[in-house]
Amino acid sequence: MDPITFDGQVAVVTGAGNGLGRTYALELARRGAKVVVNDLGINPDGTGAQSVAADATVQAIVDAGGEAVASYDSVADAAGGAAIVQRAVDAFGTVDIVINNAGYVLDKSFVNISFEDLEKMLDVHLRGAFFVTQPAFRIMREKGYGRLLFTSSSAGLWGNFGQSTYAAAKTGLLGLSNVLAVEGAKYDITSNVIAPIARSRLTEDLLGPMADALDPELVMPISLYLVSRNCDVTHEIYSAGGGQYARSFIAQTPGWFAGKGTHPSVEDIRDHIEEIRNEAGYIVPSDISAESMALLAKLT
Ligand code: NAD
């Protein structure tokens, strides 16, 4: 089989000055993409801003014979998102790939969270991905091609103590990606989500003995495959870490159907709760109408 290349394509990778984003940017460029290396250059706690992070990745790409430009804008406001995509247009003429990866973590138990904390997490993760993706999506729609990847987290998919704001923002990205997969389908725009597990500045204190096995390079292959021309998978969520690659999904059980025209009581729900919960025979609706059709089949 032919190797997967990104020749002639333009990729924007946010948060590409460190960790996962850096591995994506380096390998995209090695495989022929022209890359906008976006990074605000913040500290792991969200403070500060330094151009050196983006510059170092660009330098590594150029040293290896690739093409890249730096972008120091923050994803966390609309002007920054627009400027990041404009950087791709000005430097390389278009944008084919967006990997929304920039971010940082806030660890605080729910009772101690301020509204400001909530805003920060929503800004960098959820609004940030929106701000970068919307101007890129307009270009992709116009030209009939695009590959989008959003970075979620196991903290949101499965829950993790002390990460309510981070998890809420990260899981909001599932909804955004699902809708862009639906809206992008007829324009050959795919949209998927990665939930990575990797050693990085954000996780070095959390991973304990697993850290050595969680090289960020091990997440990179699936992230790049999902944004390649060779991949038409869309509307899905993948977990990757330590060399394991798996699909995560939101499913619906067949449930309990009370019968057309009946009005079940609270006690009826109690009496059928195990049937409602039973995972056997679950479905993964492809979109809202697929769920509605399954219900309609029971109602008619
Ligand atoms: P990292 O700190 O090494 O890299 C994140 C980069 O994003 C940093 O270079 C930082 O400067 C940049 N950044 C932060 N805010 C920004 C902003 N407003 N605008 C532009 N750049 C900004 O961390 P990482 O572990 O490589 O994380 C990458 C992404 O993966 C993050 O979104 C993180 O939440 C997510 N994630 C990581 C893990 C993991 O195990 N490492 C797990 C789940 C999710």
Image (tube, rainbow, N blue to C red):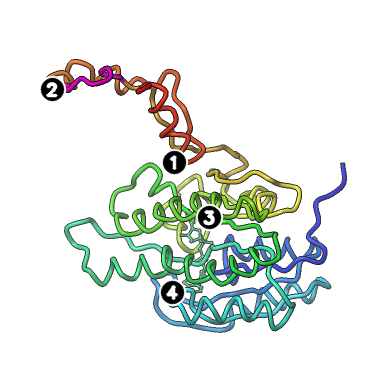
> Looking at the picture, which amino acid does disc 1 mark?
Ile
| Callout in the foreground (4, 3) | 3
Few, some or many residues within 10 Å of mark 1 (<14, 14–19, 20+): few
Mark number, residue 180: 3
Label whose residue precedes the other's in the sequence (4 or 2): 4
Q: Residue at x 42, y 18 (%)?
A: 280
Label whose residue precedes the other's in the sequence (4 or 3): 4
| Callout in the foreground (1, 3) | 1
Mark 4 and mark 3: Cα distance apart in space: 20 Å
Q: Residue furthest right?
A: 2
- For disc 4, the marked residue is 76
Question: Residue 35 placed where, x, y %?
Answer: 70, 71
Label whose residue precedes the other's in the sequence (1 or 3): 3
Mark 3 and mark 2: Cα distance apart in space: 38 Å
Label whose residue precedes the other's in the sequence (1 or 2): 2
Question: Residue 57 placed where, x, y %?
Answer: 66, 73
Mark 1 and mark 3: Cα distance apart in space: 13 Å
